[in-house]
Image (cartoon, rainbow, N blue to C red):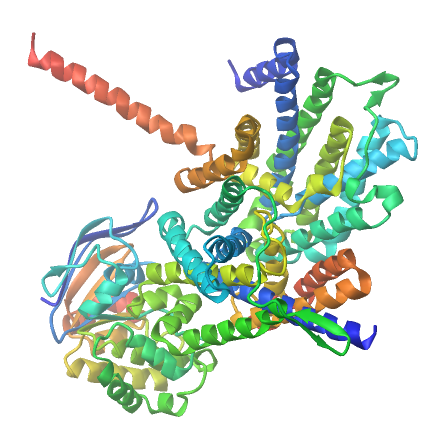
């Protein structure tokens, strides 16, 4: 691998990792508080991409404003979905997982009917392409990295230092004990689902200028999510961050060195190995 | 009447766990609730705290009906609960656990003072304030759980098996704490398998078996009672 | 009529279906439903042992590709290829199951998921001259038994029906036998079962292998029925659908996967008329069932009965009241 190729692959890895980390953090947050695997996570990511498409391309808003709106709108949608669909089911986990499957199907169907099955391009915020040492990377790819880092820092701060964030951690660790301290577990669950969706939406919105937006783009997201949270440990946001980094690098370098299909297989093989060797993941309990 | 239960019945699905239980707690009381494993004591406490709805009956606290309120509302009304098995938040520090106990309080300003007073009750918690609660010993976790419940400044404290799994010295310390909490005006419902301990601390007691109250009265009377003596005190 | 007579009558009726339903559309619906029942019932056996598999489609794929290749490349006759396809799936199930069945719950499920994706990737990207890559294998021959080729829908129906009945029979017998009792014990409490001397791993492997065998058989049928297979035919979502058939039908008895597969197959085939709206309708239907029919569709009769009883009582009550009120 030449120096230029290496730089290119490295930057690509960081970009992928940035998106993966956001998406997986949302996924693991939902898992840690609601104790369900949210099969609709990929579709939420897709909705984030469509939202940024509509706000920036159809309503011609500034890309960053469109990004913020996409995150907020989908986050609120998440809160509503939790409130209307999941909450009435009162902790019945397996049925809730199936509900998320139905939701995934319905959302994908609605998107393909409402938006049509074609690809839509989203213009990034900048046109520039940066070059260093033979490698070329567009600004719209590069910008994903600091934005993602900023969002993750905000997330960590929220969870560590705000009262509501701490309440979320408490509910994740012991929801009965949390209820006994006066924490409204139902409200926290709604909020967690909303934040989880907001994070997925951010991931989708950030990647939208890089790849095309279409109703089926969320399909393989759930698979990446599984791999990442197994690597990092279920229910751990720092685990999701580390897992996302690892997978970003595996996917990027794997694709450059061995091609996409092998890179895919490596990812899944990694998952099986981790499950056999250390099922609780790197950070899990 | 601080707390009044009237004919409370609780089911888990089709199984009846608590049947027609009536009991009263007055301000300043320590009421012992004793009985064998599976008698329904924990279920009763969880129902009072709103974690589980009663199938029938009334629960009143300070005159207000609370039996269909949500747990968060019941905490805000002034009922604290130290759950069976401690249930501290394992990945949070001692201090964070205590602060969680104060979650429902509006007067954020005096929270710090109350943390200090918990540290005074339990100096070991002050020492370990930055330590993750999951790494504490059983006795320390129990103290933390009690301290956490105190942070909400409850008028009534429900304590579920505080002595379980602890050494006699630690149990003694905890018994002293329970007594001193009561002296500051907090009523206590004490569920215990250690009947002798419970009846010593309490002024009144209820004995539960298979979901029902089978005996109640002044704790001094209960201690003299032959059946109680035989069943629980090993005489 | 005794239970057995009722069942025999039902089976007889099933065999007579092609005489009444001659349209290809309906026969296709019945055939696909039968395939789904085989998949759901075989998955149910695995779930009974307390292991959640979301990779069942992988074994169907293995069976399908094996059967296609055995008939097309090795020149084996179909009656040999199909069982061998099932055996191939079973063998791979043993290889995968041994190191991984000790994992519980979500962990095992994730292994099955990863395994299924690896299988699909292999069929998609490797051995292109053997597996055909993304376009898969086409022009798979009709099944032919001793010179007689099955080319009509009805003949396919008569092939899949006994396969389905065999699957149900075998799984039912296993469930009712000691193996079955042990499986349920294991699923309830591994450690308790272990302390009673039940060799957990043995039973889990048996359930997993037999379940995968029948998935392989279903795959073989599927390959020779549609006569074209590709990695896209056996995605993760197929595994998920099969799981949904079982769960929506109800986990408690073998009727669950059967009824679940029937109702949902009927749903999705009839929803096909909704065209683009099919996934929406299916998804919403799933959400509604899960929100309002907790123990699965099997519980529906049980739920409706009290309602009909109450309606009957109300009716009776109003008649009595009318009589009491006098003329």
Q: Residue at x 53, y 60 (%)?
A: A205
Residue furthest to the left in view is C326
- Residue C189, position as x, y percentages in the image: 54, 53
Q: Nearer the viewer, residue B62 or B202?
A: B62
Quarter residue B79 falls in: bottom left
Percent of width and height locating residue C80: 85, 30
Specify the farthest residue to the right: C74
Q: Residue at x 29, y 74 (%)?
A: B103
x then y, percent, for residue C190:
58, 55
Residue at image point 81% right, 66% down: A257
Seen at 38% across and 58% down, the residue is A190
Q: Which quadrant, please, contains the C terminus of chain A? A: bottom right
Q: Nearer the viewer, residue C103 or C285?
A: C285
Residue A270, image quadrant? bottom right
- Residue A181 sits above or below residue B55 on the image: below
Does residue C136 lie above or below C14 as drawn?
below
């Amino acid at each position: 691998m030449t120096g230029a190729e290496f730089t290119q692959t490295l930057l690509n890895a960081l970009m992928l990792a940035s998106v993966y980390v956001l998406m997986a953090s949302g996924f693991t947050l939902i898992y840690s508080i609601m104790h369900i695997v949210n099969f609709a996570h990929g579709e939420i990511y897709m909705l984030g991409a469509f939202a940024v498409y509509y706000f920036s391309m159809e309503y011609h808003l500034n890309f960053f404003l469109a990004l913020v709106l996409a995150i907020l709108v989908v986050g609120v949608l998440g809160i509503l979905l939790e409130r209307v669909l999941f909450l009435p089911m009162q902790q019945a986990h397996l049925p809730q997982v199936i509900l998320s499957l139905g939701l995934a199907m319905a959302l994908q169907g609605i998107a393909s009917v409402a938006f049509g099955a074609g690809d839509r391009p989203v213009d990034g915020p900048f046109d520039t392409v940066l070059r260093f040492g033979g490698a070329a990377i567009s600004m719209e790819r590069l910008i994903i990295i600091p934005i993602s880092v900023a969002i993750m820092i905000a997330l960590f701060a929220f969870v560590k230092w705000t009262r509501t964030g701490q309440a979320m951690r408490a509910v994740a660790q012991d929801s009965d004990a949390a209820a006994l301290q006066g924490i409204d577990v139902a409200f926290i669950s709604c909020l967690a689902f909303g934040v989880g969706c907001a994070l997925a939406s951010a991931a989708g919105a950030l990647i939208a200028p890089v790849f095309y937006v279409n109703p089926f783009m969320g399909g393989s997201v759930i698979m990446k999510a599984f791999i990442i949270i197994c690597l990092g440990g279920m229910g751990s946001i720092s685990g999701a961050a580390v897992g996302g980094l690892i997978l970003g690098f595996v996917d990027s370098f794997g694709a450059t060195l061995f091609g996409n299909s092998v890179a895919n297989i490596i990812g899944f093989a990694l998952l099986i190995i981790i499950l056999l060797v250390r099922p609780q993941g790197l950070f899990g309990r | 009447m601080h707390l009044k239960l009237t004919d409370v019945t609780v089911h888990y699905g089709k199984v009846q766990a608590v049947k027609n239980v009536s009991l009263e707690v007055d301000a300043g009381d320590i009421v012992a609730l004793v009985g064998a494993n599976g008698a329904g004591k924990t279920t009763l406490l969880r129902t009072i705290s709103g974690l589980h709805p009663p199938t029938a009956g009334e629960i009143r606290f300070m005159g207000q009906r609370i039996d269909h309120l949500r747990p968060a509302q019941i905490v805000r009304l002034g009922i604290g609960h130290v759950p069976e098995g401690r249930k501290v938040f394992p990945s949070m520090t001692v201090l964070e656990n205590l602060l969680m106990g104060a979650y429902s309080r509006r007067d954020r300003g005096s929270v710090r003072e109350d943390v200090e007073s918990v540290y005074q009750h339990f100096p070991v918690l002050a020492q370990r304030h930055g330590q993750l609660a999951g790494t504490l010993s059983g006795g320390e976790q129990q103290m933390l759980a009690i301290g956490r419940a105190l942070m909400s400044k409850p008028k009534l404290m429900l304590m579920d098996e505080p002595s379980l799994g602890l050494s006699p010295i630690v149990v003694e310390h905890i018994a002293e704490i329970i007594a001193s909490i009561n002296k500051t005006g907090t009523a206590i419902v004490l569920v215990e398998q250690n009947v002798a301990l419970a009846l010593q601390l309490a002024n009144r007691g209820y004995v539960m078996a298979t979901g029902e109250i089978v005996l109640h009265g002044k704790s001094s009377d209960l201690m003299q009672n032959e059946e109680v003596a035989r069943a629980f005190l090993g005489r | 009529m005794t239970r057995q007579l009722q069942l025999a009558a039902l089976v007889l009726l099933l065999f007579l279906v092609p005489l009444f339903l001659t349209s290809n559309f309906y026969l296709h619906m019945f055939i696909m439903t039968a395939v789904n029942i085989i998949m759901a019932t075989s998955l149910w056996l695995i779930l009974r042992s307390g292991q959640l598999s979301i990779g069942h489609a992988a074994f169907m794929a293995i069976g399908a590709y094996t059967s296609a290749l055995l008939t097309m490349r090795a020149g084996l006759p179909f009656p040999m290829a199909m069982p061998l396809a099932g055996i191939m799936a079973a063998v791979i199930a043993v290889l995968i199951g041994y190191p991984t069945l000790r994992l519980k719950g979500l962990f095992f499920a994730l292994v099955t998921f990863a395994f299924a994706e690896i299988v699909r990737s292999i069929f998609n990207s490797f051995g292109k001259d053997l597996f055909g890559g993304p376009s898969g294998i086409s022009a798979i021959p009709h099944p032919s038994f001793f010179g007689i080729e099955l080319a009509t829908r009805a003949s396919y129906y008569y092939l899949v029906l006994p396969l389905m009945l065999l699957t149900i029979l075998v799984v039912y017998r296993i469930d009712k036998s000691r193996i079955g009792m042990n499986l349920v014990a294991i699923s309830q409490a591994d450690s308790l079962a272990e302390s009673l001397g039940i060799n957990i791993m043995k039973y889990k492997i048996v359930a997993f292998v037999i379940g995968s065998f029948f998935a392989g058989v279903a795959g073989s049928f599927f390959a020779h029925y549609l006569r074209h297979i590709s990695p896209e035919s056996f995605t993760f979502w197929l595994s998920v659908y099969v799981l949904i058939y079982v769960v929506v039908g109800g986990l408690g008895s073998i009727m669950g996967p059967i009824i679940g597969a029937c109702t949902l197959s009927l749903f999705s085939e009839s929803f096909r008329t909704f065209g683009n709206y099919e996934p929406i309708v299916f998804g919403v239907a799933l959400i509604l069932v899960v929100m309002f029919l907790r123990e699965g569709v099997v519980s529906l009769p049980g739920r409706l009965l009290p309602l009909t009883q109450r309606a009957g009582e109300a009716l009776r009550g109003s008649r009595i009241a009318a009589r009491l009120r006098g003329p």
